[in-house]
Image (spheres, rainbow, N blue to C red):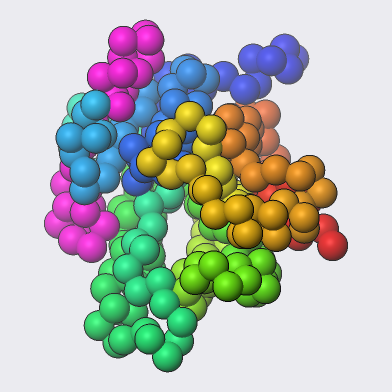
């Protein structure tokens, strides 16, 4: 019987994280690496990917930065093939990347903006899952983790935005509900191949260390925190435990699950 703490280790595993240097991607990549995985930090922003990978390597973590454009099927296939050629396997895929094009109310949404976002959020997510799961099936082993949102389990609560000018676009809600459905389809279809698929649905995120993303609108913060039982938004560390749990043998009997990470927002 394995010691319970060892069940959270990912030594010898190879993980691809899409949007791997972004808002949540940096902390997802870091968490997987800290647990022992070799991490492929992938996105269109190759310089940021390489910078994060270099930082992780300086800490003794195995990581490489790779270019990935989810709106380009050739880019997806090239990344998957390169990973197999270099490292021999793909154990974990984290579908974290999201296009924020077209985050508008429905009356401001254009067909071109909608389709541009769906090239990443819908088609791109499907294509990279397809490319990776076929390799996982050949090995009879694999793990896919999709990042959704509380906007993928609830309708947007527009009063929280008040008169701040902030809002939540219809395309984002559509995409985030869809990723939960994709998760369950993958889990149900590929379970017989020992491939698991799970989802994480985070609530509001307000990092305390990265000023580029820190939310400062006092009206929105007050309204949001008033509805959150824990009285705060998620910080940089909160997703790390969830991602390692779902990626590791600690959750080996968990599939088709949507882990809600929202400080209690959805419990009302």
- Tell me: residue 224, above or below residue 139: below
Task: In this rendered view, identify the residue nearer to me: 15 or 28.
Answer: 28
Q: Is residue 259 visible?
A: no
> At 43% from the left edge and 44% from the top edge, which residue is drawn?
213
Quadrant of residue 158 in the image?
bottom right
> At 57% from the left edge and 58% from the top edge, which residue is drawn?
149
Judge left or right: residue 54 versus residue 154. Answer: left
Residue 231: % across, % down: 76, 44
- Tell me: residue 75, above or below residue 156: above
Magenta stretch: residue 183 in it? no
Residue at far bottom of view:
107
Specify the quadrant that holds the C terminus: bottom right
Residue 55: % across, % down: 31, 18
Q: Specify start and end residues of the magenta stretch as a single range.
A: 52-79
- Tell me: residue 151, above or below residue 8: below
Residue 90: % across, % down: 36, 36
> At 26% from the left edge and 45% from the top edge, which residue is drawn?
43
The number of numbered discs placed on residues in the rendered structure image is: 0
- Tell me: residue 38, above or below residue 16: above
């Amino acid at each position: 019987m394995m010691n319970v703490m060892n069940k959270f280790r990912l030594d010898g595993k190879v993980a691809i994280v899409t949007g791997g240097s972004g808002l949540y991607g940096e902390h997802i990549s870091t968490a997987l690496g800290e647990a022992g995985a070799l991490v492929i930090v992938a996105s269109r922003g190759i310089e940021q990917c390489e910078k994060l990978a270099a930082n992780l390597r300086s800490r003794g973590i195995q990581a490489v930065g790779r270019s990935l454009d989810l709106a380009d099927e050739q880019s997806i296939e090239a990344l998957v093939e390169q990973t197999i050629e270099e490292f021999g396997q793909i154990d974990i895929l984290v579908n974290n990347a999201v296009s924020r094009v077209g985050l508008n109310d429905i009356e401001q949404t254009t067909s071109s903006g909608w389709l541009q976002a769906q090239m990443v959020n819908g088609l791109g997510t499907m294509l990279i899952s397809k490319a990776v799961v076929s390799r996982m099936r050949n090995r009879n082993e694999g793990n896919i983790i999709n990042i959704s949102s509380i906007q993928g389990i609830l309708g947007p609560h527009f009063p929280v935005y008040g008169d701040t000018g902030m809002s939540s676009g219809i395309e984002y809600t559509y995409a985030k509900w869809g990723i939960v459905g994709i998760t369950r389809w993958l889990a149900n279809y590929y379970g017989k191949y020992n491939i698991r698929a799970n989802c994480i649905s985070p609530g509001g995120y307000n990092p305390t260390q990265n000023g580029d993303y820190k939310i400062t609108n006092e009206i929105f913060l007050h309204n949001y925190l008033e509805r959150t039982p824990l009285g705060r938004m998620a910080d940089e560390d909160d997703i790390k435990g969830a991602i390692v749990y779902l990626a590791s043998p600690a959750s080996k009997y968990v599939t088709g699950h949507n882990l809600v990470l929202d400080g209690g927002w959805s419990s009302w």
